[in-house]
Image (tube, rainbow, N blue to C red):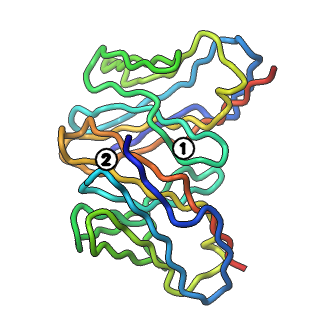
C-alpha cells in the first residue's frame, strides 16, 4: 500500500515563526501536492510538484513556499506564520503512470494552530 | 475549466437507510471520476473510481456510475452504517493534467 506520512498530526506555533511541514511518500510517485482544508471551503491547492526541484503554484500560494530536493519528500514552508494560516494541511501524491485514472494518496493531515 | 458540484450537507440518515450523494461535473476532454472518503481525524482515501462512460465503480457497498450524458457520478449505498459517517468528496481528473478538481465535500452523519 502507498503510504504518505506527514511529520506531525498537531502543531502549535506563534505568529511570525517560520514553520516547516514535512511530507514523505514511499511509492516513487512523481507528483506531490499540498492542500489546506477549511470548513465550508473544501480542499484548496497551495502548491504542487511534478518532479524534483520543480514546483507550480496552486490556487492559494501567498504566504507559503515549498521545497522538493528529493523525490520522496515535499516540504511546505510558512515563511512568517499568521493566524489566518491556522488550518488542516493535507499532503498528497500521485503517479503519472497510467494517465488520468491514477488517484491521489493522502497523508493523515497536520492540524496547525497559529497563536 | 473543470468543476465539480456536490450536494451540500450535512446529510443525516438513520442506520440501514439508503444513501445518495449527488455529484455533477463539467470538464474539458474525457475525465476520470473519483469518490474519496475522509473519516474523522484522517486524510482522504480513495473509495472508488470510474474511467469511462457507463463504468460502475464499487467498494465497501458503495457504488457510482459514470453517466456521460448527464455529466454525473452519484454515490449510492443501499444500507448505511454508523461507521460510514464521514465526509465524501467527488473529484475528476482530465487527461494531461496532474491536478484533480474536487467538490467541496458532503458530510454524512448516520445515527443508530
Residue B60 relative to residue B72: left or right:
right
- Where disc 1 sits, the SS reads loop
Residue B32 sits in quarter: top left
Q: Position of residue A90 (x, y in %)?
A: 50, 57
Q: Residues within 10 Å of mark 2 (few under 14, many from 20)?
A: few
The subunit letter for the residue under badge 2 reads B
Q: Residue at x 18, y 38 (%)?
A: A98
The residue at 74%/25% (across/down) is: B110
Q: Residue furthest right?
A: B112
The location of residue A7, given as percent across then percent down, is 52, 66
Verify CB contact (< 8 Å) between mark 2 and mark 1.
no
Residues B79 and A74: in front is A74
Identify the residue under disc 2.
Answer: B1
In this rendering, is residue B43 above or below A6? above
In which quadrant is the C terminus of chain B drawn?
Answer: top right
**Mark toward the viewer: 2 or 1:** 1
Position above or below: A42 against B32: below
| Chain name for mark 1 | B
Sequence-earlier tag: 2 or 1:
2
Mark 1, other Cα within 10 Å: few <14 / some 14–19 / many ≥20: many
- Report x, y in % for residue A99: 19, 40
User: In front here: A96 or B75?
Assistant: A96
- The residue carrying mark 1 is B104
Q: Quadrant of residue A76?
A: bottom left
Residue at image point 54% right, 81% down: A19
Is A64 on the left or on the right of A95, as rendered? right
Mark 2 → mark 1, Cα distance in angstroms:
16 Å
Q: Position of residue B11 (x, y in %)?
A: 69, 28
Amino acid at each position: 500500500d502507498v503510504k504518505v506520512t506527514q511529520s506531525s498530526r498537531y502543531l502549535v506555533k506563534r505568529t511570525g515563526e517560520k514553520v516547516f511541514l514535512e511530507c514523505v511518500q514511499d511509492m516513487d510517485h512523481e507528483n506531490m501536492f499540498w492542500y489546506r482544508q477549511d470548513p465550508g471551503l473544501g480542499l484548496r491547492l497551495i502548491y504542487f510538484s511534478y518532479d524534483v526541484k520543480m514546483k507550480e503554484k496552486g490556487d492559494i500560494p501567498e504566504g507559503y513556499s515549498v521545497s522538493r530536493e528529493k523525490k520522496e519528500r515535499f516540504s511546505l514552508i510558512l515563511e512568517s506564520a499568521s493566524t489566518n494560516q491556522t488550518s488542516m494541511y493535507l499532503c498528497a501524491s500521485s503517479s503519472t503512470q497510467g494517465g488520468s485514472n491514477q488517484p491521489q494518496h493522502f497523508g493523515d493531515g497536520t492540524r496547525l494552530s497559529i497563536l | 475549466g473543470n468543476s465539480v458540484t456536490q450536494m451540500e450537507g450535512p446529510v443525516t440518515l438513520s442506520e440501514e437507510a439508503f444513501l445518495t450523494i449527488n455529484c455533477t461535473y463539467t470538464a474539458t476532454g474525457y475525465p476520470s471520476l473519483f469518490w474519496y472518503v475522509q473519516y474523522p481525524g484522517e486524510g482522504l482515501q480513495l473509495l472508488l473510481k470510474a474511467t469511462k462512460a457507463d463504468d460502475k465503480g464499487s467498494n465497501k457497498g458503495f457504488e457510482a456510475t459514470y453517466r456521460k450524458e448527464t455529466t454525473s457520478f452519484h454515490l449510492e449505498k443501499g444500507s448505511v452504517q454508523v461507521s460510514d459517517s464521514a465526509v465524501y468528496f467527488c473529484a475528476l481528473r482530465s487527461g494531461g493534467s496532474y491536478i484533480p478538481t474536487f467538490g467541496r465535500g458532503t458530510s454524512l452523519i448516520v445515527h443508530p
